[in-house]
Image (cartoon, rainbow, N blue to C red):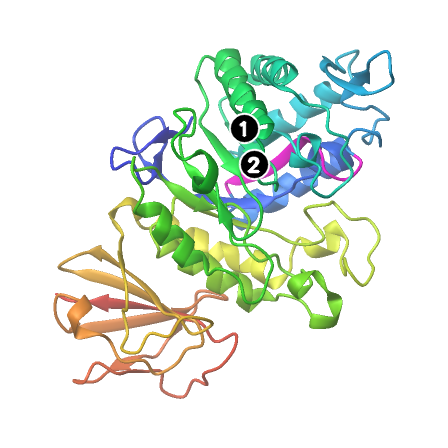
């Protein structure tokens, strides 16, 4: 089970080892896939190095009205025919929640943690989406307590409240606070809790002061330009009380830029840059996503250009192997973010992110386009004695030199979009 690190900025397992969440958004996993398909999905993500799968009980896409793969809806209806959170479907081996239990169990067998949203946000704030709004403070408490009681025998769950909607009225806060209280009463405080906000926002804008919020989650989102993930992370790290923060929904691979296919699609370079920036900004996790996987899409079109199965091995998903290996080889709780790591560090696509991993011995620098950058001498203990570099696509080591003036060069290697690299600075 996850716990808060003693530094209050990271997460640990039960033995005190730092855990960095490497997530995937599989929002419709419970709702859309049958058991064989779910196992194929989980096998793939575990093999690629993911360790955290985010999914929703009451899903966004017709989650209350369209049955799952076994013809079951999550909720029975009340006398008026409205889905009732106080009447979950539990009848028989293939009930909706029997299927949820199966998937959570299979994830646990593969060493995968599950970030479980009790509901998508349109079920309490239909600012957009299908809804309907079915929650009030009373049934939200019941729903949270019942759900946590049902799943508390597992050890691999993180509760994620919210669901891509802002809290704009007092009744929204009342629902979320009641649901969080219910979750805590249902599992006895066993599992950590966070909140998934809408795009370009953080949970800290709404519930940072809540005792039930164990760590913040932001959504750097699917716009261009949008609030850079490293700036949201830096903002959250300055808040009191100190809490970990993570990017729970970054730019999805193959997602239409600004939600319009006319703009083209975010690609593997977009995803990798955000992923490494988040790591080197002191976050506790980063969640990848693919625009065909989150809805478990079965038919492609212009807006969803891939099915969930054709999307599983897209380039950015495969590059998670490199990212996961790096995380595995380093205790990221020792990373100290470095601002302005290179001279004239420009905001935007060329922003270089860096960390000191051992203040007197090692630092790491992510260069988004593989440019010949100059180290800022005021941000490091001294000029490095040695440098090494690798490309983030496949982990292959690449040649790099550094001059007396601090300029790094990559001999024989082109610079440009998709040529991002990580440089290790060695001071001893």
Q: Which residue is mark 2?
A: 167
* Residue 119 lies in the magenta stretch: no
Instruction: State the residue at coordinates (43%, 29%).
Output: 213
Drawn side of residue 302 relative to residue 327, left or right: right
Instruction: State the residue at coordinates (69%, 49%).
Output: 293
Q: Which residues are magenta?
A: 51-62
User: Horizontal and vertical percent for residue 273?
Assistant: 47, 64
* Residue 59 lies in the magenta stretch: yes
Which one is earlier in the sequence, the residue at label 2 or at label 1?
Answer: 2
Image quadrant in which you'd find residue 403: bottom left
Drawn side of residue 390 relative to residue 196, left or right: left
Label annotation for residue 157: none
Crowding around mark 1 (Cα neighbors within 10 Å: few <14, some 14 to 19, many 20+) is some
Drawn side of residue 92 relative to residue 347, left or right: right
CB under 8 Å between callouts 2 and 1?
Answer: yes
Whether residue 326 is visible here, answered yes or no, is no
User: Horizontal and vertical percent for residue 332?
Assistant: 31, 48
Which residue is at the front of the view, 381 or 156? 381
Q: Quadrant of the N terminus?
A: top left
Image quadrant in which you'd find residue 347: bottom left
Question: Can you say whether 406 is above or below 93 in the image?
Answer: below
Q: Secondary structure at mark 1?
A: helix
Q: Secondary structure at mark 2?
A: loop
Question: Can you say whether 393 is above or below 45 in the image?
Answer: below
User: Horizontal and vertical percent for residue 139?
Assistant: 65, 15
Q: Which residue is mark 1?
A: 173
Instruction: State the residue at coordinates (57%, 58%).
Output: 251
Image quadrant in which you'd find residue 136: top right
Whether residue 353 is visible here, answered yes or no, is yes
């Amino acid at each position: 089970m996850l716990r808060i690190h003693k530094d209050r900025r990271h997460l640990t397992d039960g033995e005190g080892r730092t855990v960095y969440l490497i997530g995937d958004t599989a929002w419709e996993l419970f709702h859309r896939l049958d058991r064989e398909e779910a196992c194929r999905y989980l096998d793939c993500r575990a093999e690629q190095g993911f360790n955290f799968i985010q999914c929703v009980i009451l899903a966004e896409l017709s989650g209350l009205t369209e049955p799952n793969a076994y013809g079951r809806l999550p909720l029975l209806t009340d006398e008026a025919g409205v889905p009732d959170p106080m009447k979950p479907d539990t009848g028989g081996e293939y009930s909706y929640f029997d299927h949820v239990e199966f998937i959570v169990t299979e994830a646990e067998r593969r060493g995968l943690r599950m970030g479980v949203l009790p509901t998508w946000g349109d079920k309490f704030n239909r600012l957009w989406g299908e809804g309907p709004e079915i929650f009030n403070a009373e049934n939200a408490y019941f729903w949270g307590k019942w759900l946590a009681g049902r799943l508390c025998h597992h050890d691999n769950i993180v509760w994620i409240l919210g669901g891509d909607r802002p809290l704009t009225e007092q009744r929204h806060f009342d629902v979320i606070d009641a649901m969080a209280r219910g979750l805590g009463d249902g599992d006895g405080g066993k599992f950590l809790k966070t909140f998934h906000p809408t795009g370009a926002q953080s949970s800290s804008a709404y519930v940072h002061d809540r005792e039930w919020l164990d760590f913040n989650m932001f959504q750097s989102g699917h716009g261009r330009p949008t609030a850079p993930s490293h700036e949201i992370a830096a903002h959250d790290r300055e808040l009191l009380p100190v809490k970990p923060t993570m990017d729970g929904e970054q730019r999805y691979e193959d997602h239409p830029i600004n939600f319009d296919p006319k703009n083209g699609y975010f690609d593997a370079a977009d995803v990798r840059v955000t992923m490494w920036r988040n790591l080197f900004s002191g976050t506790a996790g980063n969640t990848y996503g693919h625009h065909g996987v989150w809805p478990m899409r079965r038919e492609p079109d212009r807006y969803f250009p891939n099915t969930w199965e054709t999307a599983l091995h897209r380039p950015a998903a495969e590059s998670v192997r490199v990212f996961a290996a790096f995380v595995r080889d380093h205790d990221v709780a020792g990373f100290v973010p470095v601002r302005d790591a290179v001279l004239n560090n420009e905001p935007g696509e060329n922003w270089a992110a860096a960390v000191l991993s051992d203040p007197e011995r090692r630092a790491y620098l992510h260069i988004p386009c593989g440019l010949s950058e100059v180290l800022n001498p005021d941000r490091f203990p001294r000029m490095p004695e040695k440098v090494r570099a690798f490309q983030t696509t496949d982990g292959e080591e690449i040649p790099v030199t550094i001059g007396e003036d601090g300029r790094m060069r990559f001999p024989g290697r082109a610079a440009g979009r998709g040529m991002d690299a990580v440089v290790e600075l060695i001071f001893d």
